[in-house]
Image (tube, rainbow, N blue to C red):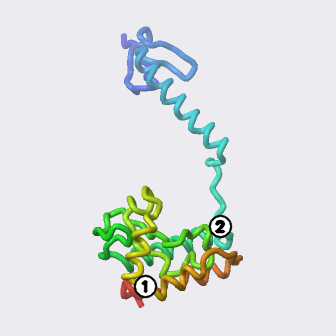
Amino acid sequence: MATATLKCVECKDRFPRAQMKPLAPGNFCTLSCIASYGLKKAKKDNIKKIAKIYGADRKPKINKDDLRTRKRETKKACHLYVRTRDKGDNCICCNKPLTPNYQAGHYMESGNNPKIRYDEDNIHAQNLNCNYFKGGDSGMYRVNLIKKIGLERVLRLESMKGGVVKRTVEDYKLIENHYKNKLKLINGDL
């Protein structure tokens, strides 16, 4: 006579009924399978709770005409253009070859200088170390910037320091498209 077998919820193997350990979700072959199932279940439940709390279980709404989205996309297009334009140059601060993770760094901080935030003379390729860890290394940035673009253009930037600029979604779209088109020119796509 054949012995009745049951399938383990965790390992999916079949075992004689007498050997199985019945629990609420089903039957398990060993304590090890019970523990493994419990850990997976706890992790899955925890992820669901976190997703529910932070709204990750819902599909995010993307509004392409949202001011925040336009600012982010404009910055992305501008910085990509600068990194592409300056590829192969040296870091504007330390004058060493650019490392693979180089960034588009501002001579005059973008947050406090909205008039020149997207000015090409104000943004140049910088190594991550100079831009992030040395706070932009503005002393050497100015010296090397004068060598690169000339004193007259550096003084023009400095004369535009500060100020307030209220940009609209349309303004950001124009700036973004400007840099996307310049990038296409560099890449030979136009």
Up/down of 189 relative to 163, above or below: below
Give the residue displayed 48% in from the left and 86% down from the top. Answer: 153
Residue at 48% x, 26% y is: 39
**Residue 151 has which mark?**
none
Residue 184's disc is 1
Position of 154 with respect to 71 (left or right) is left
Asked if residue 115 is positioned above or below residue 47 in the image, the reply reads below
Quadrant where the N terminus sits is top left
Residue 125 x %, y %? 40, 72
Instruction: Tell me residue 28's x, y (percent).
Output: 45, 18
> Which label belongs to residue 68?
2
Mark 2 and mark 1 in contact (Cβ < 8 Å)? no
Mark 1 Cα shell of 10 Å, populated few (<14), some (14-19), many (≥20): few
Which residue is found at the position 53% from the left and 29% from the top?
Answer: 41
Question: Which badge, 1 or 2, comes first in the chain's sequence?
Answer: 2
Element type at mark 2: helix
Above or below for 79 versus 159:
above
